[in-house]
Amino acid sequence: YVSAVATAPAWRRRGVASALLDALDGRRAGRACFLHVADDNGPARALYEARGFLAIAPDDLDPALSAGVALEIEGSDEAQALLFVPGAPGAGAKTAKAGAKKRKRAKRGGFAKGRRR
C-alpha cells in the first residue's frame, strides 16, 4: 500500500514520482499494490493510471483489506480515490519500459540518481 506521497512543486515534472514508482515496481515482484490519491489531483491520477493503476471502489475490497484502507484515508480533508495495480505475470516488462523512459529523461536533464540541481 502506497500512502501520503507528495512531490514539492519545484520538483514536479522532473521524474521524481516516476522514479518512486520504478522502485515500487522493482520491489512488488508482480504483486498487486494499492494507493489512494486526492480525487481531484488530476496530474497524479494521470501518472498512476498511465502506470497501470485502476480505480476501484472500497466496497469491492475484501472486508479485512477495506478496514485497513479506511484507516489509511481516515481524517483526510479531501475526497480520496482508491487505485490499484493488479499483480500479473510478466510485470518485469513494464519495469524495463519505465527504465528506458527514465534514461531518456536523464538525457533531457530531468531527475536522475546522483544528479543535483
Image (cartoon, grey):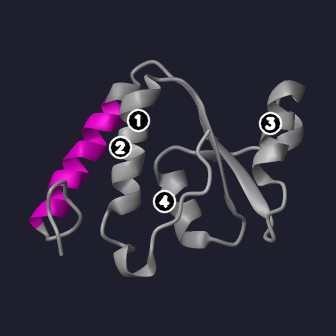
Say what amino acid the circle numbered 1 marks: Asp
Q: Find the magenta span and give its range.
A: 93-107
The picture quadrant where one finds residue 5 is bottom right
Task: From this view, report whether residue 48 is shown above or below residue 32.
Answer: below
Q: Residue 22, labelled with which disc?
A: 2
- Element type where label 4 sits in the image: helix
Q: Say which residue appears at 81% left-offset and 71% top-offset.
A: 77
- Measure the C-alpha gap from mark 2 to mark 4: 12 Å
| Viewer-side label of 1, 4 | 1
Name the residue carrying label 3.
68
Name the residue carrying label 1.
25
Say what amino acid the circle numbered 3 marks: Gly
Estimate the x, y position of residue 8 in percent, counting from the top left: 45, 74
- Measure the C-alpha gap from mark 3 to mark 2: 25 Å
Location of the N terminus (image quadrant): top right
Q: Say which residue appears at 35% left-offset and 61% top-offset.
A: 16
Kindly report the secondary structure that dominates the magenta region of the rendered protein: helix
Q: Residues within 10 Å of mark 3 (few under 14, many from 20)?
A: few
Q: Residue 47, labelled with which disc?
A: 4
Q: Could you tell which of marks 1 and 3 lies nearer the N-terminus? A: 1
- Element type where label 3 sits in the image: helix
For the question of whether residue 57 can be seen, the reply is no
| Viewer-side label of 1, 3 | 3
Task: From this view, report whether residue 85 is shown above or below residue 49.
Answer: above
Q: Residues within 10 Å of mark 2 (few under 14, many from 20)?
A: some
Q: Could you tell which of marks 2 and 4 lies nearer the N-terminus? A: 2
Say what amino acid the circle numbered 2 marks: Asp
- Element type where label 2 sits in the image: helix
